[in-house]
Every structure is written in structure tokens, then in C-alpha cells.
Amino acid sequence: MAISSKSSTDEFIKGLWRDNPVFVQVLGMCPVLAVSNTALNALAMGLATAFVLIMSNIVVSSLRSFIPKQVRIATYILIIATFVTVVDYVIQAVSLDLYKALGAFISLIVVNCLILGRAEAFASKNTVGRSIMDGLGMGIGFAFALFCLGAVREILGAGSLFDVQLFHDSFQDWVVMILPSGGFFTLAAWLLLFNWLKQRKERKAKQDESAALAIRGEVA
Amino acid sequence: MASESLWTIFINASLVNNFVLAYFLGICPFLGVSSKLETATRMGGAVMFVMLVSSVCAFGIQLLLVAIDAPYLKLISFIAVIASTVQLVEMFIKKVSPALFRSLGIFLPLITTNCAILGLALFQTNKGYSFVQCIVYALGAGAGFTLALVLMAGLREKLELAEVPDVTKGTAMALMIAGLLSVTFMGFGGLGG
């Protein structure tokens, strides 16, 4: 029992940080870049995707022994499309402004490779419980990454966060950050940061290792 | 909206609102297949072809859905019909022209879940284009995708030889170039209207 609870927490953490879908695996780029021009849009898109991911993970993993292998991809896509349609109508009912801002990109969650990837690589091989944890971790990790991008772009591009002005009037907006090219630049900057952290960690590990070897050598 | 001239639609879809650089559709193949010029060209051709086929399909489905009054089935039927049509087309090409199949073949199944294809189908129904306008829109979007992909591949081939810091290698570098290309494409803003 202890082992299984530990491993399901591990499934959760994995998606959140170590295998973060956006920063580490670089999956599902289209919505990431397209709707991250404000923090609110980005967060809404992230949560919508997380919901679809969790629901499709649940359904795929509970039906995994019934789905014939040959038509599995088509089946997954149909399951995902069903939940996306639900999300599409819910957002339209809750906030029309948000619906207009996100536009066709809500429908395009269907072809987000992250969701299909998790269905194929994880949910079709694991129990419902573990799939839920995986969906939660990946979904929240995705929403978090989208929020990071959206926040940076909104702060620099409009001088505000969630429509609250942060700077004095004299702040000059970086209009380019709101425009499509800003999405590419911001994501590139985040990836640079992650690469740098990873390299530093590797270098440190190597140093530790050589230090340990040196000590062992002295002892011998 | 639906009264735009064909030329305007073409310019808009290929340059001003380029699917890759302005709408961020089809980023995965854009980053994945753009390291060699030759594969990029073939991929572009295949995408253009699939776009044309799926645009025609989407137009038909939309008519049918309006007739039976079931708009909530739009997404599901679009993706299902496009995916199966591409499969059929792939088999047909394999039978009729093995040479064409060899040059497009491997890319066809990959493209089916490319968001640019579904995006095109959704945009054209939102805009309420007529049949001819749909075809021109698909051609324009395909041409724009190919252009972006080929430009990107050319730049990345040159970059192979350049000395860049270790941290920027890979996706980060590709994204920065894409950002610059996107800025360049903003220059087309006034065209087409």
C-alpha cells in the first residue's frame, strides 16, 4: 500500500515538474503560444486542457480492455473530442468574453498532442487511479507553464497582470510581446532558463562525483 | 465577410495571417521537420494536399450538419471524417502512384492530427466561405505553411555551421528564429486588407 501511494504521488510530481509537458517535453505548442497573450486567457486555456486531459485519461483507462488495438487512436480522438465539445459549450455559457478571446483554440484542444500522447502512452496501460494522478499532474503542469508564459507576456506587453495595472503610467509597453512573435520569444527564454538550470545541475553532479572520487582516492 | 475577393483570401491566408507564424497552428511539424530543406518541401506539399481534401470534406459536413440541425457534432465529425479521408487518400495514392506515395507517404498519417488542418476546417466554417472561397483559402493556407517551413529549414541548415552557446541549442534556438520570422511576416500586415 505504502509503495502504491508513493508511486501515485510520483506520477503527480512527474507531470508537474520533472517531465513538465511544455518546458521539458515541448508538447502541445500551438495553444501554448496562441492564447498566452494575457495571464487570464492562458490560465483558462490551461484549466480547460487539464480538465479534458483528466477526463479522457479516466475514460481511456477504464475502457482500456475493451478498445480493440487497431482502432485505438480513432477511439481516443473521439473520446477527447466529446470532452472538448463539453468544455467548448461550458465556456460559452460561463463567459462569452473569454469564449471570444480563445476563439477556435478551445476546439483545437482535440489535436493537442499532449492529450493524445498521455492517452496512448499512459492511460491505455495503467489503472484508473494512476491515470487520474497522471492527468492531474500533467494538466496542472501544463496550466502552470501556460500561466508562466501568459504572465510574462502580459506584464511586459501591457504592464498589467489579470488586468491590474502594475507600473506607473510612464511605463512603455513592449507591444511586440503581445503580438505573435512575443510568444515565440517568451517560450524561447523560458526554455533557455530550463536548459541552463539543467546544465548547472549536471555540472554540479559531475563535480560532486569527482570530489567523492578524490576523497576515496585519498583514503585509499 | 463572405464577399471577400479570392485574391484577398489567398494573400490573407498565406502571408498576412500565416497559419504558422500568426495563428501558431501546426507548430509541432514546423519545429520537428524543419531541419532539412528537402523534407520541409515535401512536408509542405503533403500538408497543402491534405488541407485541400479536408477543406472540401469540411464544407460538405457543414452543409449536412446545418441540414440536420446538429451543430454540436461539428468537432467530432470534422476530426473523424478528416482522419478517415486522409487514410483513404493514402491507400488510393499507394495504389495509383507509388512514386508520389514514396515522396508524401510517411507524412500523410502524421498530418492528420496537425492542428493546422482542423484549424482550417473550423475557420472556414466560422467565416462562412462559399465552396470556391474554401478551396482558395485552403490553397493559401497550404502555401503559407510551406513558405514558413521552407524558410525555417533554410535558416536552420545554415545554423548547423554556426557556433552558438550550448544552452541555446535545439528547440530554444528554433523558437527564437521562428520569433524573428514572425516579426518579419508582420511586415505583410497592410497587404490584402
Image (cartoon, rainbow, N blue to C red):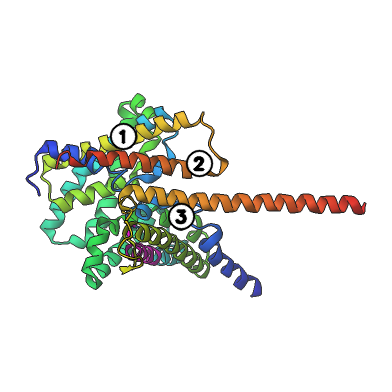
Residue B5: x and y in percent read: 9, 39
- Please tell me whether mark 3 sits on a helix, a strand or a loop: loop
Label 1 sits on what residue type?
Thr
The image position of residue A170, as x and y in percent, is: 31, 61
Query: Pointer 2: what residue?
Result: B170
Sequence order check, earlier mark of 1 and 2? 1
Chain letter of disc 2 in the image: B
Judged by its main secondary structure, the magenta piece is: helix
**Who is closer to the viewer here, A8 or A50?**
A50
Residue type at mark 2?
Answer: Gly
Task: Identify the element where label 1 is drawn.
Answer: helix
Of badges 1 and 2, the one in the foreground is 2
| Real-space Cα separation, disc 3 to disc 1, in angstroms | 25 Å
Instruction: Tell me how many marks there are.
Output: 3
Q: Find disc 1 in the rendering and name its residue.
A: B146
Question: In the displayed image of the protein, which residue is found farthest to the left?
Answer: B3
Amino acid type, label 3: Val
Q: Which residues are magenta?
A: A37-52
Q: Position of residue A103 (x, y in %)?
A: 24, 58
Q: Chain of mark 1?
A: B
Looking at the image, which residue is at 16% across and 47% down?
B60
Residue at image x 32%, y 56%?
A172
Disc 2 crowd rating (10 Å Cα; few below 14, some 14-19, many 20+) is few
